[in-house]
Image (tube, rainbow, N blue to C red):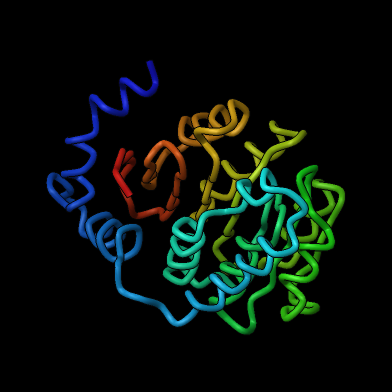
Amino acid sequence: MIKFKRYYTAIPRYKRSKGFGIHSPFAFNFVLKVLRERCPYYAYEIINAARWEASRLASSAKERRNLLSFKNAKMIFRITCHFNPSSILQIGTSHGVASTALMNVSSTSHLHSYLGARHQRKIYESVTSNFGSRISTYDDIATAINNYTSQLTTEDRPFIIINHIDNESSLITNTASEFIAKGGIAIVCNINNSSTIKQSWQSIKASMTHGMSFSNDKIGVIVGYDHLPLQHFSLWF
């Protein structure tokens, strides 16, 4: 049923991804210049090198298949680059490819990363070794959230990326919803691979009173700007 729905809606989603039917200037620019941007960025070679390093260190073909795709890593970089957060909260990580994409946006940004059950410590530490103290890692999710929120200033927009949810799904969902209510940004990955993440994504969207969501049913982005009307865009990117 899900695959049939995706095929059935493919043409409208593709047209919308080209800008047709999008009346909001913000949404139009975000879709065409961020989500679907095809021009090269300075960090792409670095991200690709990190992915190859992770693949080299992976112990099995199955583990290599679980690596974040280069396409999605580039998109995470573009999204992060567009909003340029000074501090980022990452929920769940494995090989460090997403962290590399996040951290190459700015030389001064800081990442608070809850490792999660899929964490490959040796690979992650090798891939992200250049970032040093700019990455704080946590084995406890509540501590990660508390430490992240405690250092946010009144001028900071919360920025969260959810890669995997192993436990405390309600805490993660509520945290993301609170961030969106405060004008924050959320990136949610693996929507199609995890029923828990899919439910969390739907719950976060349902809690919105303003802002916009963009999704291809695999990755979703929510922009909680106060001035944006409540709109949801199903796209092809």
Between 45 and 22, the one lying in front of the other is 45
The picture places residue 28, in percent across and down from the top left corner, at: 22, 57
- Occupied quadrant, residue 200: top right
The picture places residue 13, in percent across and down from the top left corner, at: 23, 39
The picture places residue 89, in percent across and down from the top left corner, at: 67, 58
Determine the residue positioned at 80% across, 47% down.
141
Between 32 and 184, the one lying in front of the other is 32
Determine the residue positioned at 54% across, 52% down.
182
- Image side of residue 233 versus residue 110, left or right: left
User: Is residue 29 positioned above or below 5 on the image?
Assistant: below
The picture places residue 144, in percent across and down from the top left corner, at: 79, 54
- The quarter of the picture where the N terminus appears is top left
- Occupied quadrant, residue 100: bottom right
- Occupied quadrant, residue 126: bottom right
Determine the residue positioned at 73% across, 49% down.
60
- Image side of residue 12 versus residue 211, left or right: left
User: Is residue 212 positioned above or below 99 on the image?
Assistant: above
- Image side of residue 133 versus residue 79, left or right: right
How many numbered marks, from 0 up? 0
Determine the residue positioned at 46% across, 71% down.
81
Q: Residue furthest top?
A: 1
Q: Residue furthest front?
A: 61
